[in-house]
Each structure stands twice: as C-alpha cells, then as structure tokens.
Image (cartoon, rainbow, N blue to C red):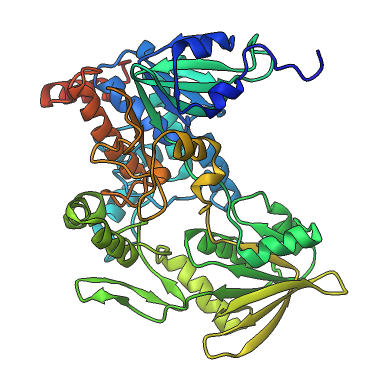
Amino acid sequence: MQGARPVGDLTPELLRSPVWHDRQVQAAGIPLFDVPLVSVGGGLGSFTLVDVLRVQGADAGSIRVLSSRDAPWQSWEYLTRVSQLPAGERIRSDAGARPDNIWGFPSYALTEARQDKSMKLLWQVLTEPILTDFFSPRAATVFETVRREADRISYWQMLSKGQVRMVRRRMGGGYFTVLTPPPGTSATKRVVLRSQYVHLAVGYPGLKFLPDLQQFRETHNDYHRVVNAYEPHEHVYETLKSRPGVVVVRGAGIVASRVLQRLMDDRERFGLQTQIVHMFRTFVTGSHGPGMWMRRKGGDGWAYQAFTLPKSAFGGQLKAQFRRAEPERRAALSKAVGGTTTPRLRRWQEQMRRGRAGGWYHPFQAVVDRVEPTPDGRLVSLTRSDDGRLGRYTSDFIIDCTGLEADMPEHRVLADLLQYGGARRNGAGRLAVGEHFEVLGAESEGGVLYASGAAAAGNHFPAVDSFLGMQTAALDIAADLARRGFCARLGPVRSTRQWIRWMRGRPV
C-alpha cells in the first residue's frame, strides 16, 4: 500500500516515547542486538575511549563503535586538510598528547626524531619556547600512529557502519541506540543496539557561518566566492595563481593563521600579486588578561597561545580550579582563559612583517554590516570600526575562518537527547556532565550515558576538545566503568605490562 511504513522502521509510538520497552522495539520489527557498551561517533573521541578500555582489559566483543566514518581519523584529517593543514604540516598539539598512547611516552618528538634520524626535534623540545617554537607533531604522524594502534586493539572488529538516529532510555535500565545501516547492508531500515552503557563523542554539530556571510550565500546562491575555511575551497588558491586578486580573511584563530600562511606561501612561491585584507572583530595590541598571573601575549591583532588552552588547564592549577569552581565561577574562568588564539610561530611572523612593509597585507579591526555583489562580479564588504568609521572593501573572495560553533540542536542525536533523553545544557550551552563525564539527567536505572569532546565543553574540565582532553575524559570514564565492573582497574602493574606490550606492538 502506498505510504505504508517500511518494516523495521521507527513507529510514531517510539518517536514520541522518552522511555522504550523491549516489546515496543520488537513490535516495530526492528532487529535488536545486545552489547554492553556502545560508543557513538567513531572519531578520535570514540577511539581514545576504546583504546583505554582495551588496555584496561575490556573484551573487543563487549564494545561496539557506531560511525559513518571508515576510520577514526577520517573527519579530523578532512578538516585539517581543507583548513590548510595537509598531512606533512604540523598541528597544534603537545609532543606528549598521543591518542594512540595513553602514557605519552615515547613522545611524538622522539618518534619523529627516530624516523627522521635527526636530533633537531629533540633539541627543539628541550629548548622550547625560549630558543625555539613549541614542538608539534606532523598530522601524518598522528594518522599513522592511530592506524597502528587501531590494528593492535582490534578496532575494526568493533566498528559498525551507519548513521545513528537517536539514543533512548530503556525500561528496566540501559539504552537503545538506533542505527541506520548503509543501503543494502540490512533487511530493515533500522537496527537497534541494546546496551547498559552509551558513550557520545559526536564532535561539533557542524559549520557555523557569520550571519552576514550566511545571508549573502543564501540570497545570491553564491558558494564559490564566499567560503568557509572548513569546507573545500582550493579553487580560491588556484584562481589566484592564474590572475591577481584580493582576498578578505575573517577570523583570528589557528585556522585564520593557516589560511594566511597558505596565501603568503603561494605569493612567495609563485610570484603572485595577491592582496590580503584581514578583518579582526577584536584587534589585540599587546599582552592582555584579567591580572598579572593570568595574561597571554598578543599583538598585531592576534592573541598568542601555544595550545588551545594554557598547559595548566590540562593537568595543573587551572584544571583544579575548574573542578572545584561553581558554575558562575567556571563560566568566568572559561571566558578568561578561552577565546580565539593562535601560536606565535617565527616564520609566519616574518611573513606578516614583510606583507605589512610591502603593502600587500592589510590587517585592521572592523565589524562587517553586510556583503553585497558588485556589477563586475566581485564582492564588497561594508564595515564599521570601533571609532565609528565606515569602510568599503572590494574583493574577489571572502574566507570565513571563525570556526565550527554550531548549536547542539543542529545535531540530530544531541537534539533528541535534549528533548527526550533527560539531558540538559550547562552554562556554555553544551551537555551538563558530572565528574566522570556522565550526562546529568540521562541516567537509566543503572545504565550510564557518557559524553566527551566538544559536546561536553563548559563543565569541570576545560580542555575537553583536544587530544589530551579526550584522553583525560577516557581515563575518567574508564575508571567509572571499572568501578561498575565493566573492565579492570588501571593499576601500576597492569599499566606497566600494557605499556611494554604497546612498545613491542603486541595485541592487547
């Protein structure tokens, strides 16, 4: 009959019920599979938790990773590549922050020094940041080491491909996770995994454009001249190689600095005449911060910081302050130590100095009111500065480098969790979680829903969206699961044995 619901699909009753009974799923004809723990996402957040759990003795058959990705580094590799950080370039991460190695030793610096047969990287680590820039690993090194560890822990055996539709609480405890398998791989449209524990590591909900740029794209259906740095935009650089042009860059973080370096590298390498107009919403002129003990360097529009957050946020005094703080104090701390920053690298600084002196790099503070097309097929940005001056800047392209900060309701699983799963927002608008990264309000009679990564930002641990932050969350979650009997505790004897196995490349 036309319009009939396909067998094995969600029913209206299931869609409107916050808690499901086993017989409701069975009545819908949806295949039901049991597994103790499900991790939703399949990126580096899922991989890091699975790695820790396998080191702590969890069997591969007790874990299922649900993902639309083929590999845990796939999305991150895509984002780094399109934002002008190809595999051979260095990322913004510490030498000891290794998703594949919970001990952090040997560090990435030692690994690359051995590969390159050079002591230069070890000297850099020993003298950073006084004599040299902070060491950061190559993106390719991360991909290679994560691939090796995925093989070692039997990650591929735990991976199930598909799109997760929702997570609902189960009557009697635990959760149902609804998966839409790839076409042709299942007799039904959906399958359901029934588990005691669920882990969410879904990353950012998606791209978020600046309002004036979003309006321009939608109004004029122009996705060629106005682009986001996190979407493919190689055509911008290729066009500039064929003729002189003007590019407006908007943003002041690590991605903006990478885009600028690509434009400047191309200009020098190919003898181009590209003009770069760089608009800062906030123009930093020097060191800044709430007090003498909490300041960061700045200048020429930029706020400089080697990593996303100060090192003490990962395992020092600042981390302890966040853990003890009340929500209001935590929000104030987040505002003080967070914000948009980028590393201060010597080569890039010299490029900007030459650009300013040569009159082809133009940085300034401005707020853009709107962007309009010109009759000759170009773009005009209408701006105003803090002192009220109005500006008009014509360009061939605009590159938005302002980030991935889409809201939670734009992610299907998170939106459903807020509406039906009992979850609530914290002061930062993300999921409120407890000290073991359990999602508050989403408990299910002994079952626990955990969250890590970007979705858990703004809670007791500030550096969640980083390699080291993902490992910290994974260790805390695994400790809670060990207390509940899911896996063994990571004591000194087990840790030493497992590190030796890791060094020798032996399977867990």
Q: Residue at point 32% right, 44% down?
A: 469
Q: Quadrant of the C terminus?
A: top left
Q: Residue at point 21% right, 23% down?
A: 482
Residue 94 versus residue 18: which sits nearer the camera?
Answer: 18
| Total numbered badges shown on the rendered structure | 0
Residue 457 versus residue 361: which sits nearer the camera?
Answer: 457
Q: Quadrant of residue 210?
A: bottom right
Residue 318 image offset from top left, x and y in percent: 21, 57
Relative side of 206 to 193, left or right: right
Q: Is 22 situated above or below 456?
A: above
Which residue is situated farthest in the right direction here? 375
Residue 274 versus residue 430: which sits nearer the camera?
Answer: 430
Residue 87 image offset from top left, x and y in percent: 53, 43
Relative side of 363 to 122, left or right: right
Q: Is 279 situated above or below 262?
A: below
- Does residue 504 show up? no
Residue 218 image offset from top left, x and y in percent: 75, 58
Q: Residue at point 48% right, 73% down?
A: 350
Q: Residue at point 53% right, 63% down?
A: 256
Residue 396 image offset from top left, x and y in percent: 75, 69
Relative side of 441 to 19, left or right: left
Q: Quadrant of the N terminus?
A: top right
- Does residue 1 show up? yes
Which residue is situated farthest in the left direction here? 492
